């Protein structure tokens, strides 16, 4: 008798609910992630952090405390890929995040406040997916300038 094991990919997003975060959740769900958004103030009471393979958090200046959260998570959930959201520009927050050992950055577009899926971690995820589909015979749509659920 063979046993099939199904592994769900879990992503935890530590951020306020904004259109960019909704966009990010839709993008991750199209990549088969189960997503959970939590507020930074609830971080200590979230056992889901320990099961997440991907943890994303906003490190913009108004959310500078989230760097401490990244540091905490890096110690207690070393299996998780840590991905901060930022505006870019090699800021002190980005330098500290690199020291913590993040997997990459998701960039927020200055002009429209939405995620820029053509840069950083998002671009590398899409390239990995395209490579995987190329060798499995699948075909992915070309990335668009903006992402919506109809892009899945």
Image (spheres, helix red, strand yellow):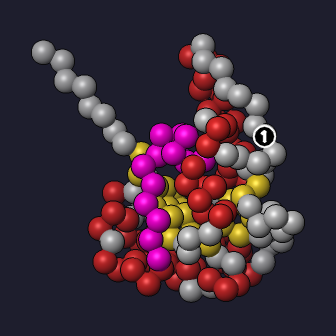
- Tell me: residue 149, above or below residue 20: above
- Residue 33 among those drawn in magenta: yes
| Residue in the image at 39% along x and 80% along y | 42
Residues drawn in magenta: 27-39
| Residue in the image at 84% along x and 68% along y | 110
| Residue in the image at 74% along x and 81% along y | 92
Residue 59, picture quadrant? bottom right
**Which x, y percent locates residue 9?**
42, 45
**Which x, y percent locates residue 132?**
59, 26
Q: So how many labels did they put on this image?
A: 1
**Which x, y percent locates residue 55?**
49, 61
- Tell me: residue 99, above or below residue 115: below
- Tell me: residue 131, above or below residue 45: above
Q: Is residue 62 left or right of residue 48?
A: right
**Quadrant for the C terminus in the image:** top right
Q: Is residue 55 left or right of residue 23?
A: left
Q: Secondary structure at mark 1?
A: loop
In front here: 17 or 100? 17
- Residue 43 among those drawn in magenta: no
- Callout 1: few (<14), some (14-19), or many (20+) C-alpha neighbours within 10 Å? few
| Residue in the image at 77% along x and 67% along y | 113
- Tell me: residue 146, above or below residue 115: above
Residue 125 seen in render: no
Q: Which residue is mark 1?
A: 144
In front here: 4 or 92? 4
């Amino acid at each position: 008798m063979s046993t099939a094991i199904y592994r769900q990919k879990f992503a935890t997003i530590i951020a306020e609910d904004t259109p960019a975060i909704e966009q990010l959740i839709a993008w991750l769900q199209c990549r088969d992630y189960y997503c959970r958004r939590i507020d930074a103030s609830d971080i200590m009471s979230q056992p889901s952090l320990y099961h997440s393979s991907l943890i994303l958090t906003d490190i913009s200046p108004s959310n500078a405390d989230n760097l401490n959260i990244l540091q905490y998570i890096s110690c207690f959930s070393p299996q998780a890929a840590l991905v901060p959201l930022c505006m870019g520009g090699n800021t002190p927050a980005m330098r500290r995040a690199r020291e913590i050992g993040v997997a990459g950055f998701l960039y927020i577009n200055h002009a429209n406040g939405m995620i820029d899926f053509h840069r950083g971690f998002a671009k590398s995820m899409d390239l990995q997916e395209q490579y995987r589909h190329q060798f499995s015979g699948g075909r992915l749509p070309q990335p668009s300038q903006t992402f919506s659920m109809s892009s899945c």
